[in-house]
Amino acid sequence: MSKTLVWVEHDNASVKDATLAVVTAAAQIGDVTALVAGSGCDGAAAAAAQIAGVSKVLTADDAAYANALAENVAPLVAGLMADYDVFVAPATTTGKNIAPRVAALLDVMQVSDILSVEGPKTFTRPIYAGNAIATVESTDAKLVVTVRGTAFAKADATGGSAAVEAVAAAGDAGTSSFLGSEIAKSERPELTSAKIIVSGGRALKDAETFQSVIIPLADKLGAGVGASRAAVDAGYVPNDYQVGQTGKIVAPEVYIAVGISGAIQHLAGMKDSKTIIAINKDEDAPIFQVADIGLVGDLFSVVPELIGKL
Amino acid sequence: MKALVCVKRVIDYNVKPRVKADGTGVDLANVKMSMNPFDEIAVEEAIRLKEKGVVTEIVAVSVGPAKAQETLRTALAMGADRAILVVSEDEVEPLAVAKIVKAIADEEQPGLIITGKQAIDDDANQVGQMVAALLGRPQGTFANEVAVEGDSIVVKREIDGGLETVKLALPAIVTTDLRLNEPRYASLPNIMKAKSKPLASKTPADYGVDIAPRLKTLKVTEPPVRSAGIKVPDVDALVAKLKEMGVA
């Protein structure tokens, strides 16, 4: 049986949701050891030990790992991989930053963004913005894989009782430092875990209109807020709102697309949603080809009316 | 400081890719090909750094078929100074591309290597990080803003929760995200001028890199099709549907 090493995404105190789907994928490949690399990360390690399906937790606690800088973390992972067959990371911005650096250190060709595990070294993955699905088999001795979170069920966050073992830190490479971050603080559900998402497109005209039209609807439904690339590029909302192949991949119970035409790029990021609802004044908009429920109309009258009647 | 910019020839982003009937890949015969959009942003950023006097020379690099020469001419027309084409008619995986770029960097000694965060064909998102690993240099992936300050570069990165800023010692590798800049169009005089800019043609063997693939593509299929549902006539009908689903 393969031994997998899973990258745990965390904030030192708790484990982020993205990790749970990765554990599910890794469990389909082999035995799961979870790696918590951080600074003062006992809380995250304890949480990782409780994830169902995790048989061991390794912690590397060092100031050099506080912000998951790839220059510091990749050598640690590559060193630990002497005892493992497969490194599995989430296809989040953190996972995408670190995993290829690990793969190159191991002289391995990474398999990015897997959708399914078809065999010990065989996976499916999207190419061409999800317009094609490739089935690939690795011939490398060791594997490095990133996992698309929406393609795998989340492992239970509790029920496990893995042993926690500390491993030595690999030090600071001394070539990079973390200066700061601008993380949007919001009471809203995170896009990648929200049950309902309301997304707005270019038709929202400007930032103020986006706020005054989309936000009240999201508030009414307790929904996360997303946007098309066009809306982000136009500056209506920050980059972390972007749903699409190069933004966030989401799969909520209900996705409500408001004033989004449905570019391929956007569809690639949300077409696995359970129910898609589209509101658009152009009845030929491509979004209607994937929507379960479509309403052709002017969003500026439809959305306020909808809010009033909910 | 010299900048190396890596560009890839890919299907034009406006073309809808079609899977070949025999399931061996995507049909690229008679399909419009262009520079990977993220790489255009990389070329543009290098040019802006040159205009600021930070970068002194821009070398554009591409690994791909002989026709990738057109992609490099585009980079030259935008403002790159010279180009290196590493010709392979076979597909070259990100790891091998990274090894080639590493070998070129060893020769050229750039202070900065810029490339797109991913190519829109294989969507691998690997080359920049792998080059950084092979060179043992820092990486600023998914860049939203960059500023060279003395012997380091400050990179604002697009991350899932928002933005984060890192400071990297030069030489460093930067991969571009969408909001870094808006690439310029090459003007006609510059397109003409680009034809006489130097373009060296090499092979992977020149750099001692084995490009034998590590991944075997067993098949390529169409994604599951989502069929269109129903249209409702008005808001009342939509509300009724939402209530049925337990959403409202």
Image (cartoon, helix red, strand yellow):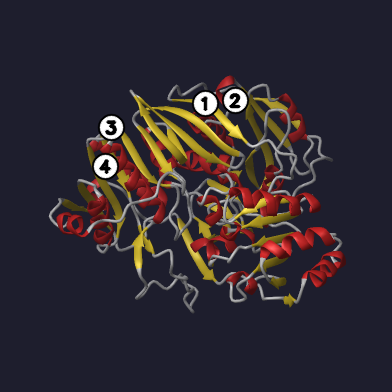
Instruction: Provide the residue designation for mark 3.
Output: B54
Query: Which mark lies nearer to you, 3 or 2?
Result: 3
Tell me if label 1 and label 2 are in contact, CB under 8 Å.
yes
Pointer 4 local density, CA inside 10 Å: few below 14, some 14–19, many at least 20 = some
Q: Respond whether the residues carrying marks 1 and 2 are from the same subunit.
A: yes
Mark 3 secondary-structure assignment: loop
Q: Respond whether the residues carrying marks 2 and 4 are from the same subunit.
A: no
Tell me the kind of residue under disc 1: Phe
The percent coordinates of residue B247 (x first, y second) are 83, 59
Q: Disc 1 versus disc 2: distance between alpha carbons?
A: 9 Å
Q: Chain of mark 3?
A: B
Instruction: Provide the residue designation for mark 1.
Output: A178
Q: Is residue A218 left or right of residue A246?
A: right
Instruction: Provide the residue designation for mark 4.
Output: B104
Taking the view exactly as shown, the residue that stands out farthest to the left is: B196
Q: Respond whether the residues carrying marks 3 and 2 are from the same subunit.
A: no
